[in-house]
Image (spheres, rainbow, N blue to C red):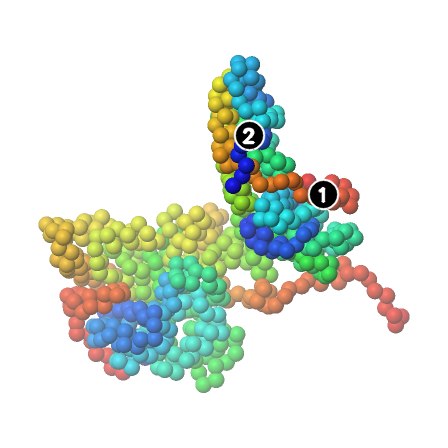
Amino acid sequence: MKEISNYEPQIIAFCCMHCAYAAADLAGSSRFAYPSSLKIVAIPCTGRTDMGHILKTFEDGADGVLVAGCLEGRCHFQTGNLYARQRVEHVAELLDQIGLEGERARMINISAGMGAKFAELANEFAKTISALGPTGLKKKPASRELPLPSGKIE
Amino acid sequence: MIVADQKPIEDIRKMLKGKKKVLAIGCGTCVAVCFAGGKREVGVLSSAVRMATELEGEPVQIDETIVQRQCEKEFIEHLGDQLGEYDAVLSLGCGVGVQTLADQFPGTRILPGLNTKFMGGPTEQGVWEERCQGCGNCLLEYTGGICPISRCAKQLMNGPCGGTDEGGRCEVDPDTPCAWFNIWERMDALDIQDQLMEIQPPKDWSTSRDGGRRKIVRKDLQKPKLDEGS
Amino acid sequence: MNQTPLKSNSRLERILAAGQFAVTGEIGPPKSHDAGVIREKCSQLKTYVDAANITDNQTGIVRMSSIAAGILIRNEGLEPVIQMTCRDRNRLAMQSDILGAAAHGIKNILCLSGDHQSFGNHPGAKNVHDLDSMQLIRMFQEMRDNSQFQCGEEIKGGGPPLFIGAAANPFADPVALRPLRLKKKAVAGADFIQTQLIYDMDRFREYMKKAVDLGVTESVSVLAGVGPLKAAGMARYMRNNVPGMSVPDHIIERMEGAVKGISNDDKKARMQASRAEGIRICIEQIEEIKEIEGIAGVHIMAIEWEAAVKPIVEGAGLYPRPEVEN
């Protein structure tokens, strides 16, 4: 179905600065390998990720999106990672409706000291995405935001 | 506020079948605060539909914008210059917004992206409940400030039916409290429960939607006209 | 003994006016146009009850019209009590239907809110609820006594002679409100009340005491709802799932005890033993109900088990039914 040979899945990992980002760093310095095509985006808390970020990441060519936050109960902002989990679950449902596989979005929880665990979970996710293959979205279709008449609306 | 919910992606895909270029327009008022049609939701929905249609092999370009209030002409007029290039507009406003756009731009196909649900408010984070049906003749005076027209499945005006479960839940939906159970408790606490013995006469529904399309005219606010005779 | 002229001269009204202990039954019309079903059920109830309720699309399921089925049983010699719900008709249809029913000689009417359509076979239907049951009672009372339509317009030639009934669910929450609601129905113009199925006699006695204290029973005849249990499972189901249904443990234990010692494989014997016990309990409850102050009769609900009515009425010493002068 999809070309698998030499296929390196494009994975974006939104990593919380307080835990997963440090864990990824530790994995690197401890020589626990994880796929080189996995790109890390540091965020202040996984609670900052919104569904738009994840969907646009897919639109921009990602094959999988990992959201990596602190262990549940250990969020620097109390509940940011719990909100993140709900949103990732919702995105997974949306992906199914879109015609992509919901498994392409995943939430994981780790602490700053879990370098090996980060590598293990990242490899496992990469394996899942490799098995699913590319999304089939070739190129982001042109789209724009129209300018607002005056002022900004949020 | 008016509370709405996004239509399923599948329904929107069907609506947009054959369209090449679509403008999604959000609304910054009610539907923004109930997280159905604000800027963020326009972004998520547009992104989802773009991907879905591309995967289907018929990609639709969806541009995004938002207006502060889709239900008033003054807030949407400026869009007129740009609509010419679009095959359709996907409105993420409530039903009023969709119709205001359609009235303002009769030459453009305006499609609804939301299902407008009810007039209500948030009762807890992530939960909205109906509170008013706009019957046009408020009876909250008689019911302890709890509306049985919008909160009782049978719109009873003289007390609960026999279907109140233990603990005061409605038998139609056990997650919903029985409006009349709440009315009783409220009026009992206010010590005005004897008012419930007064029989409420049949309601005059002519002020509700049954009376036909409703309209309010405020002469004091209308544009003054010069009397030509004087 | 009753000096005031009768309102409808229905058999049920005459029985109650004569101070007799009334017995009503219930017939659920079929989900078809088969008049034979009605006649068959009618034959099982006739002579054992003074009148039989005809349900109105009960639980929101489409069935033969209650008025049409009522005419059928009236023609068979059994007096109908037409049930009318606020769910399916607005005030125009309700008034027009009651005039039509009266033209066919129907006199007893039971005013109900109606089960919500979500329980029935057309859950997507639009419900009406133009009036509620209280307003329906009052509307019929004004049609009858003041010869006027709900809008105030005069009914030329006089209002329909109706005997107006209402329902009561004594144990549904909020429990403290229920006797007051009964009173409100009396004030609205109800002539008789049929209650929801009663199994908890202790609680029912308390409820009736409050009703008597409120003076409700001076103007309204209260018929206690009873019904034979088919099996212990049915009793448990009702206790757990039907709002306001209070089924005491001792009733459930008796139903369980009835099938003790009968092999699980002998389904027929278990069913017979269980049903016989259900009928025995029902008879005992009627005996208890007779002793409760303010009670004017019983309403026996044995839907889809009409054959149980005969042994219950006979067993409770209520047969033959008294003759009352027309």
Is disc 1 placed on a helix, strand or loop?
loop
The answer to whether residue B94 shows anywhere in this view is no
Residue under pointer 1: A145
Q: Are marks 1 and 2 in contact (CB under 8 Å)?
A: no
Identify which amino acid the numbered label 1 is placed on. Answer: Glu
Residue A152: name its quadrant.
top right
From the viewer's perspective, is residue B4 above or below residue B200? above
- Which residue lies most toward the bottom here? C157
Residue under pointer 2: A6
Residue C209: name its quadrant.
bottom left
Q: Is residue C161 left or right of residue C253?
A: right
Q: Is residue B51 left or right of residue C280?
A: right
Q: Residues within 10 Å of mark 1 (few under 14, many from 20)?
A: few
Residue B86 in the image: state x and y as whole percent: 72, 53
Q: Residue at x 26, y 69 (%)?
A: C25
User: Which chain is mark 2 on?
Assistant: A
Residue C161 in the image: state x and y as whole percent: 38, 79
